[in-house]
Amino acid sequence: MPCPDCSTSTIPGARYCHQCGRRLDTLADGLKVGDRRVVTALFADLVGYTRLVDELDPEEVRARVDGALTVLGDAVVHFGGSLEKFIGDAVLAVFGVPAAHDDDALRACLCALEMQAALARFVTGDEQPMELRTGIATGEVVAALREVAGTRSVALTGYPMTTAARLQQMAEPNDVLLDDATVSAAEPRIGVDHMGERLLRGQRRPVKIHRLRGERRVISHPCRKAAPLIGRDVEKARMVEILRRAAETGRGGVVFLRGEPGIGKSRLLCEMEDDARAAGLAWMWIDNAPHGMDSPYRTVRNMVDWLADEQGVKAGIVARQLLFGDDVAPTLDSETSRLMLGAIAVLARDSEMLLLPEEGWESGPPDPVNPADFQTGIRLATHLWVNRMIAGKPRCVVFDDFHWIDPSSRVLMEIMVRMAEELPLVILTGSRPPVMPDWVGLPHVKVIDLGGLDQAATEELGTAVAGAALDAESARWLYQRTAGNALFVGEIMRTLREGGRLEQVGDRVRIERGAARRGVPLSLRALLGARIDALPLVQRGALEVASVIGMSFPEPLLLALCGEAVIDGDLRELAEAGIVTRAEEPGMPPNQWRFRHQLFLDAAYGRLLTDRRRQLHAAVADRLDLSEPQTDAAELARHRMAAGDAGRALPLLERAAREAAAVGAVAEAEAFVRAAAELRSAAVPAVS
């Protein structure tokens, strides 16, 4: 492939052009031929470019603009976005391509804030700081590879691309304008001002617009009190007992709460706050995020910030008081002080926390510290910090989303976990499998596996979100679709309620038939897309083929359709990831698999472009046509219809109708007859 900039033939697999240095691994890497996916687009434009051209020499303008665009690009890379292109004095970035994350909308918002801060720092002499107008939008795009004149690029087409550009045009200098989908996905970690609805140029529906104020630190989980805690009485009772024992005996404990995304870990942990305070324990909630994993000591710094807010002082002051205050300094020998001061200086530098002289710290860069002294000093400081933090009052500390804790903080947290056995300290953690730290084997650590809600609890939660009791059919459908995943239940019911898709039937509500039952809420598509993108490319492809086959799929059929690229080990790894499972129900044929949730099927299927779907449905139908015993006519008809093959689908639908009628399945027979009639009608050209 030639380099897009200098046209030199590049080395296959190279990340950079050996002639001009241009980066070659772009958005295209990690994408297949084409994908539908949820992304967040960020469009930022430098303010005052025309004025600079009028006032300065062109070389100086180019140097300033190139420098500014460089710091903007650095911010995009830092938050895991992809630079799609620079357009003159503007930058277009996308979060969610080629790999999705759980928090792409939040990453885009934090990136916009960092862009403004970076531009403010990008000033020399008496230059005026440069400003930005920024627009951010979230939604579905088609991401497809484009080959033009031997140059490979990615074309992203969809609502967020045009909406982000329109919002940017509306923004005032240093404004960041967001659409409603971005706010919904990023809350409660951002603060916004609501600006009402506007009809943007070129769009038919008005868009709710919000101005980004800044980042907010989460004090407790956003779902708190949104709906009652349902179906978790046993798990809650086990944690309450640990809290009470810590308050009564002065000996704490640790809970490692494990479960798949959305199962309700954070909701349950948040529910413990009232019980902790009732038992006389102070409370601390530390959230972890995927975009913070590369920030050394991020979790430790959040703990310092929490205590600073709690005491109403600056972070540097509370750290100094706890470690070197007047009541503790006399007990420290000079060697301990030296080791701790050196370690704290390094920690502060790596976590970008300033130690100011006015807060009692020495100014200037830290002296070199050898690794052995640093390890000793950080352990001494951690032991002292924990003991001082709980002096006079027991404490409960929550580390939410432990799987995203930064590696530096993970080491210090392990020290805290070991100390909790002998101190009035309770540590509650929530984590996704397969993460399992070494310390879970300690005697004072309890592991709680959180599974899906049962059918009754799923119906109760659905009723709470809907605001009225669900009818029996809707309750069954909700459980089958979500397998009791609390987040899935809540998001689906909220989307149906807000979209007017709940019908009142007597004193109950019924989920409207049709499109409402087939779609996946945007928020869940982003979450599920992130889990799919974390898989190797081969396994992603296997999932998409499986989604075409159906909720259950035979292993031989899947392997035949995927070719040699997929092996049975890939299916085992997909099972370990919690996406598929073996189908072991009575009467099922051997080597049968199924999706863990209908939503996984929908998310994988929804990523396929239309042409690819048709090709796969045709391939599945061809295979089933040759299978023994003969495949059900209705199943074959479904694939032929989805493949756009009306000629072969019609006789299958007619046969399916006869077979259903023969066994008394009147409703099914009528549905097949209607489908056949609609297919004939669609095939007849309109008469002009």
Image: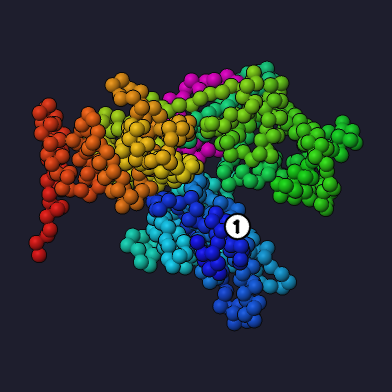
User: Is residue 428 one of those drawn in magenta?
Assistant: no
Provide the secondary structure element on which disc 1 rests.
helix
- First to last magenta residue range: 220-243
Rendered location of residue 345, percent (x, y): 79, 45
Query: Which residue occupies 27% across, 38% down?
Result: 623
Q: Quadrant of the C terminus?
A: bottom left
In this view, 611 is above or below 239: below
Observer-nearest of 474 and 1:
1
Query: Which residue occupies 43% across, 25% down?
Result: 231
Rendered location of residue 459, percent (x, y): 34, 29
Residue occupied by mark 1: 75
Query: Which residue occupies 66% across, 43% down?
Result: 298
Residue positioned most to the right: 334
Amino acid type at image mark 1: Ala
Observer-nearest of 628 and 325:
628
Observer-nearest of 408 and 324:
408
User: Residue 243 occupies which quadrant of the picture?
Assistant: top right
Can I make out residue 287 in this image?
Answer: no
User: Is residue 229 one of those drawn in magenta?
Assistant: yes
In this view, 155 is above or below 406: below
518 to the left or right of 162: left
641 to the left or right of 232: left
